Amino acid sequence: MFDTFPKQLPHTPLLDSVPTPDKLRELTPEQLTQLANELREFLLYSVSQTGGHFGAGLGVIELTVALHYVFNTPRDKIVWDVGHQCYPHKILTQRKDAMKNLRLRDGIAGFPKRSESNYDTFGVGHSSTSISAALGMAIAAQAQHSDQKTVAVIGDGSMTAGIAFEALNHAAHTRANMLVVLNDNQMSISNNEGGLATYFAKIWASKTYTRLREGGKKVLEAIPPAWELARRTEEHMKGMVSPGTLFEDMGFNYIGLIDGHDIDDLVYTLSNLRDLEGPQLLHITTRKGKGFSPAEKDPIGFHAITKIEPKSNNVSPSCSQKSNAKKYQDVFGEWLCHTAAQDKRLIGITPAMKSGSGMNKFANHYPARFHDVAIAEQHAVTFAAGLACENTKPVVAIYSTFLQRAYDQLIHDVALQNLDVLFAIDRAGLVGEDGPTHHGCFDLSFLRCVPNMLIMAPSDELETMRMLTTGYQHVGPAAVRYPRGIGVGANTGAANAHEPITIGESILRRESQKKNIALLCFGTTLHEAFIAAERMDATVVDMRFVKPLDEQALHTLANNHKLLVTVEENAIVGGAGSAVNEYLHREGIPVSLLNIGIPDTFIQHGTQQQLRAQCGLDADSIERAIHARLTKI
């Protein structure tokens, strides 16, 4: 058990001797515990140097070792759900030395990535996809007459999503040869532990029991009443010590509960399950943050960590300049509590992102009006629609990348019925080190085409407050999208912080004397654009609204300027700039245009500052792009 992070690179001789799983499989079973201990210590050190997802990886150390020991990876396929727990897997699959560059630009990704390693069988980042993907691989292997094995590893939290149960249902129907490992880290589902459960689980996984079961089935199926009695007897025995009845009823052979930190039991059980036919489900219990006492005590707080920096008494100038700045998620949390105190109709909803969305204080103060629906984005949106039908005012706090999963519900259940739902869209734009599965690059594009939607993009914390109030008071579906991280220090305690703004009204932030160039900014891109405008003496307009646009301002700007430049932290394709283009074309207004935003490609991981520069969204890049465009006019 570790109480602190290792301060220097640990000595890991056994881990260093197994750079790949084929070398791991040369170890004796007695060496696996030492390997797991060295792997845990190295993981503690490496993540303290880089930051990243933390507790989940510590919880699956033994499972990861056992899976690669028993299965012939990469020929046998292991599909990790979400990917928060994949760091031990990466260390054991030729990427130990690369961990020093984890989540850094041009370094290895924080999630499984097919292009990074043939051991990463499926790219993930959103939860609950592993069973569906693994089933596809198993069916393909069956069609190709291959004996490769397929394993899906899914956490109990991910089992709350509907897609997981859709996949379980289909797998049982196909009778595919696959194994689902349900990693229950005691955050949900089951509390059944102890010797009796483990004892029976080992019996049920044994080859002797399997032979007896199948032999008995052949005999008793000829006598239907006897077979039904035997089946129900087995079902009730399992139900006494484990929650496996649900999975048995769905058509899986359920084995559990197994201590997920007992590497001997894991290897024994996995070895028996490896060659069984049909869908199998192994239920293990683990402890998130296992082996690091602070993470075991606070698994939520240690879900992910930032890089552990050496202590310093020096305060950098950038820190002092932003001493009053707040995270946008905290700005939302403040607004939510203030508004809830004024209006009892407000109900807050989140799909398993209470802490990340800044809703902890609201949940504590208004527990009856707070609903965490678990990893079920589709349900969250339709649930909000149902609430809105009954004269309440639901506020759905959701990350931009996860709102993509509820697009059908947003269109058909909310917008089509013009229901009164406010979407607080966090992590819009480039989120940084979590990479392409988590960037919120597309929300303006996919929201803008939906009728009845009011779409706002605040440029700072105060504007975020006011736009949330505007969307809340608006009758109909509304969305406020804001980025990850801290703002610029705008005063959210201002007297007008909770006053709404006029819908569709932009703000002139800077007026050029030359009136050659006008920068039309959507969201927090305003600040870098303003720096570029100062250098070039350009007009700057904070557009604020993506839908409806301030068409009067656009008309005036187009008639008074030589070049209009739209700037947004969203995909250029179909984004806010496209909305400006469409309006000017529709009105037949001749003016040169330049759209600056995220290009038509998936942006990889790096710091937000690096990625914004890469996409041309920093001041220098904006200035260069404008000069290049002017040469063509």
Image (cartoon, rainbow, N blue to C red):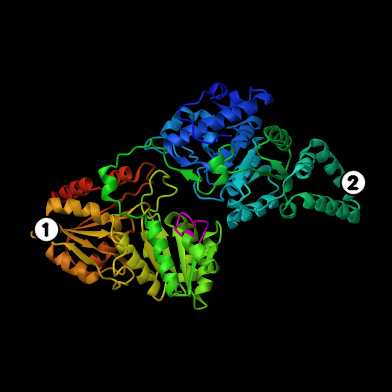
Q: Is residue 616 magenta?
A: no
292 is higher (above) or lower (below) than 243: above
Q: Position of residue 629 (x, y in %)?
A: 17, 50
Magenta region, main secondary structure:
loop
Is residue 118 something that shows in the picture?
no
Q: Report the magenta residues as a range.
A: 350-360
Q: Residues within 10 Å of mark 1 (few under 14, many from 20)?
A: some
Q: In this orientation, which residue lies closer to the viewer: 420 or 285?
A: 285
Judged from this view, the residue extending furthest toward the bottom is 391
46 is higher (above) or lower (below) than 389: above
Look at the numbered disc 1 and give the secondary structure of its residue.
Answer: loop
Q: Is 86 positioned to the left or the right of 483 in the image?
A: right
Q: Position of residue 600 (x, y in %)?
A: 34, 49
**Residue indicated by mark 2:** 219
Q: Is residue 356 magenta?
A: yes
Residue type marked 2: Val
Q: In this orientation, which residue lies closer to the viewer: 507 or 546?
A: 507
**Residue indicated by mark 1:** 516
Q: Is 194 positioned to the left or the right of 357 in the image?
A: right
